[in-house]
């Protein structure tokens, strides 16, 4: 309910803003392109691609197939809507029913779809037999009347969601060339048990599961590059130490329990080394450790006995590391080149900038900064240096974390009172709560796509 | 006559520019869906009949991104029929060439 | 707690034994060849002595009470010092681990107590207010505790007796979203091991 309202408000704002843009940009959006006599048209309206997902055709016309068809339709619609790319058209507006009339390019009357504004159409069929299903999915461009994707899937009747995730990924790959995010998960901290423990849910908030049982303070989950291991800080031995849980086997090993405060683990991309912030040598500094906890080297130089360097976040190629440092007096975001050791300060606006998260698609860093006494999420473009503020709502907005395809950002927000996990598109639209558990939820960390789960 | 075709030429240019405005209004494109690729450029050519019907829409330069190309042709198709030829012009069709780019203009 | 009672008891015992010695010393018995005069003299002297003894006894009572009070006061003072050690926290400015001048007196008291109780080891806990990032606050709490430890070492306390532990913003002592609450949470707190 709230989601629909939020999106409606979002759209009104978008329309108003776009209206302004049109009036201002109208004259400058069309210009004489003297080269080859082409007229240049730029500054399109940003909006979602209207998409229709009607019910699947049931091959045996059984009740089971009807139920599963409804489940598949609903699930695929939700997945695609979650990305923020698509606007799902209400079934009530449909002028024909491919589930009855026909699902292939010869049977579909594309005018019936373009007329209701749908630019994309998904049709499909489902056959169920002895608890196994065969599903075919097709994606069409209604204006060009062309088939874009065709797939067939087999699985148990419990695997509808998995099949939808795979077809959804095909659709995203068709448009963006990326693997999307339907096979990713989000780890986060929740205090529902009375203690802070780490939980994992699917990318859309489904099926949350508690994965630690430290009965102490547990913080800062960090995914390995293949999504099989989770590092985190926990007080289970009486002080902040770093542990690693193998999610498949379930066993937990200690990474480091050096004297002092051991926090903010971050895996080096594609490797088993980790960076972490340790204080055993005086000053809180960032070190490089092996998977076994042996210290390879100190990454950030010791600039003061009372210095603080925390929260490392690597670029996707591992060549650079963003981090938070107090070296100029207040917490700001810096970047260090791993090979040369050269350090560059990134944030100059505001007195408190922290929680850097490097986009997996390269040249952007999301972070949380204090503006007018509360935290907001910002994204900095490293090429241009431009900073965009993505949140403006009431409450504190912290701990941004990118989806593996760089299209969305998860973060924590106290806009409803209690702190909850939220998601939004990477341009700040479609902000909504991801899930609701007892206690408060903080510290989200988005995993890579994990394909064999 | 020279003055006649010069007059026609300026009418046609003005007509094309106005068409550009009409079609721009129908052009919707989600940058996110094009994976934020910024330098996309699609060139499209089409013909407008005297009554405003559009025909023969063809992409003369692909951007490399299917969705981008599709959004450009869609903008044109959705706009049909457009405004009729300017009165006094006596041509079987007007050829129009547009290049679509998501970049803003300075 | 046990230590305090042991101290008190030993003090009382010491005082009691002192009292006995004192009273023994004051009693005298004399023999005189001039019996009658001597008797009278003795009687008088005895009376005098009795009176003196009585006076002395009163003085002794007062002295005993005074010493007992002294002992009690000392015991109370020691208990208070330990209480203060545990219950008086050091406070910090926002986003700072600098020891304020106004806090130096408190740190000196802590140091003195530690130097007087050499068999004690302590943990200094570093805490932050709720504002700011969880991770950054863990580091800030650690720096606060580390700075206090360093100051104590400068005042002569052996580093092996002091451990530090940061809780960041995870264990506030005052709930609330005002500076009144926040200022109480930005603290270093001592725990006796």
Image (tube, rainbow, N blue to C red):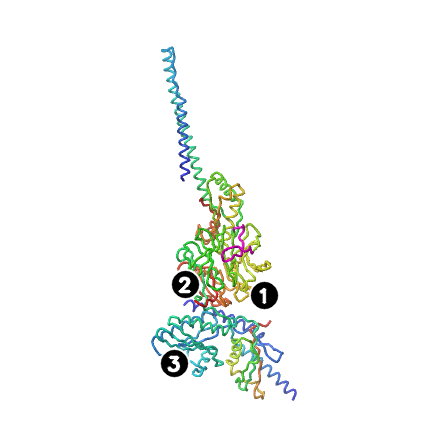
Residue indicated by mark 1: A384
| Vertical arrangement, residue A71 with respect to residue C68, above or below | below
* Marks 2 and 1 on same chain: yes
- Which region of the structure is painted magenta? A280-299
User: Residue A332, located in which quarter of the rendered image?
Assistant: bottom right
How busy is the neighbourhood of tag 1: few (under 14 within 10 Å), some, or many (20 plus)?
A: few
Any magenta on residue A292?
A: yes
User: Mark 2 — on which chain does it sit?
Assistant: A
How busy is the neighbourhood of tag 3: few (under 14 within 10 Å), some, or many (20 plus)?
A: few
User: Mark 3 — on which chain does it sit?
Assistant: A
Q: CA distance from mark 2 to mark 3?
A: 37 Å
Residue indicated by mark 2: A208
| Vertical arrangement, residue A221 with respect to residue A113, above or below | above
**Contact (CB < 8 A) between labels 2 and 1?**
no
Any magenta on residue A180?
A: no
User: Residue A34, located in which quarter of the rendered image?
Assistant: bottom right
Q: Give the structural element (helix, strand or loop) at label 1.
A: loop
**Contact (CB < 8 A) between labels 2 and 3?**
no
Residue indicated by mark 3: A100
User: Mark 1 — on which chain does it sit?
Assistant: A
Please identify the quadrant where the C terminus of chain B is shown. bottom right
Q: Mark 2 or mark 1: which comes first in sequence?
A: 2
Mark 2 or 1, closer to the camera: 2
Whole-percent x, y for residue A263 in the image: 49, 55
| Vertical arrangement, residue B31 with respect to residue A354, above or below | below
Whole-percent x, y for residue A268 in the image: 52, 61
Whole-percent x, y for residue A400 in the image: 49, 62
Whole-percent x, y for residue A246 in the image: 44, 60
């Amino acid at each position: 309910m709230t989601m629909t309202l939020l999106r409606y408000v979002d759209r009104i704002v978008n329309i108003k803003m776009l209206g302004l843009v049109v009036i201002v940009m109208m004259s400058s959006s069309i210009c004489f392109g003297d080269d080859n006599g082409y007229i240049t048209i730029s500054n399109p309206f940003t909006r979602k691609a209207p998409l229709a997902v009607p019910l699947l055709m049931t091959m045996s016309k059984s009740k089971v197939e009807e139920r599963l068809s409804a489940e598949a339709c609903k699930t695929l619609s939700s997945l695609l809507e979650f990305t923020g790319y698509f606007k799902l058209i209400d079934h009530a507006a449909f002028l024909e029913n491919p589930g009855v009339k026909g699902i292939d390019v010869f049977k579909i009357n594309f005018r019936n779809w373009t007329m209701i504004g749908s630019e994309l159409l998904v049709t499909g069929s489902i056959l169920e037999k002895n608890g196994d299903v065969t599903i075919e999915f097709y994606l069409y461009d209604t204006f060009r009347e062309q088939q874009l994707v065709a797939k067939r899937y087999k699985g148990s009747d419990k695997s509808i969601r998995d099949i939808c995730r795979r077809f959804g990924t095909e659709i995203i790959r068709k448009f963006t060339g990326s693997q999307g995010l339907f096979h990713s998960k989000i780890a986060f901290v929740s205090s529902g048990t009375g203690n802070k423990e780490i939980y994992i849910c699917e990318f859309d908030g489904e099926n949350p599961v508690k994965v630690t049982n430290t009965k102490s303070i547990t913080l800062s989950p960090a995914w390995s590059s293949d999504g099989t291991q989770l590092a985190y800080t926990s007080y289970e031995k009486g002080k902040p130490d770093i542990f690693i849980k193998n999610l498949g086997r379930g066993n937990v090993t200690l990474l480091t329990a050096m004297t002092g405060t051991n926090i903010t683990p971050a895996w080096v991309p594609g490797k088993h080394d980790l960076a972490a912030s340790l204080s055993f040598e005086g000053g809180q500094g960032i070190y490089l450790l092996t998977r076994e906890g042996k210290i390879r080297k100190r990454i950030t130089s010791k600039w003061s006995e009372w210095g603080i360097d925390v929260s490392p976040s690597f670029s996707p190629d591992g060549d650079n590391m963003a981090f938070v440092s107090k070296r100029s007096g207040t917490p700001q975001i810096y970047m260090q080149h791993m090979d040369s050791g050269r350090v560059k300060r990134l944030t100059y606006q505001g007195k408190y900038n922290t929680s850097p998260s490097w986009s997996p698609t390269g040249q952007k860093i999301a972070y949380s900064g204090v503006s007018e006494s509360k935290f907001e999420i910002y994204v900095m473009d490293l090429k241009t240096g431009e900073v965009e503020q993505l949140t403006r709502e009431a409450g504190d907005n912290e701990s941004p974390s990118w989806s593996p395809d760089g299209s969305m950002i998860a973060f924590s927000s106290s806009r409803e009172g209690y702190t909850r996990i939220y998601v939004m598109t990477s341009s700040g639209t479609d902000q909504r709560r991801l899930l609701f558990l007892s206690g408060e939820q903080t510290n989200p960390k988005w995993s890579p796509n994990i394909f064999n789960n | 006559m020279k003055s006649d075709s010069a007059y026609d030429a300026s009418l046609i240019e003005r007509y094309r520019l106005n068409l550009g405005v009409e079609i721009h209004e129908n052009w919707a494109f989600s940058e996110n869906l094009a994976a934020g690729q910024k330098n996309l450029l699609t060139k499209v050519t089409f013909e407008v009949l005297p009554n405003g019907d559009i025909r023969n829409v063809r992409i003369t330069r692909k951007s490399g991104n299917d969705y981008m190309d599709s959004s450009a042709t869609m903008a044109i198709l959705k706009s049909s029929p457009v405004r009729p030829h300017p009165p006094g012009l006596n041509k079987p069709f007007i050829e129009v060439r547009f290049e679509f780019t998501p970049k803003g203009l300075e | 707690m046990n230590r305090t009672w042991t101290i008190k008891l030993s003090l009382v015992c010491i005082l009691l034994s002192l009292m006995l010695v004192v009273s023994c010393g004051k009693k005298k018995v004399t023999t005189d060849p001039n019996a009658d005069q001597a008797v009278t003299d003795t009687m008088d002297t005895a009376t005098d002595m009795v009176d003196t003894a009585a006076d002395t006894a009163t003085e002794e009572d007062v002295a005993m009470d005074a010493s007992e009070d002294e002992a009690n006061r000392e015991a109370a003072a020691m208990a208070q010092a330990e209480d203060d050690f545990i219950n008086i926290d050091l406070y910090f400015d926002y986003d700072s681990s600098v020891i304020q001048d106004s806090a130096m007196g408190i740190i000196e008291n802590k140091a003195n107590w530690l130097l007087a109780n050499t068999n004690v080891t302590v943990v200094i806990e570093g805490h932050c207010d709720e504002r700011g990032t969880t991770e950054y606050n863990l580091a800030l709490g650690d720096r606060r505790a580390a700075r206090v430890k360093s100051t104590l070492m400068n005042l002569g306390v052996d580093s092996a007796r002091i451990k530090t532990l940061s809780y960041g913003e995870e264990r506030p002592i005052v709930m609330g979203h005002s500076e009144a609450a926040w200022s109480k949470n930005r603290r270093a707190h001592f725990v006796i091991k």
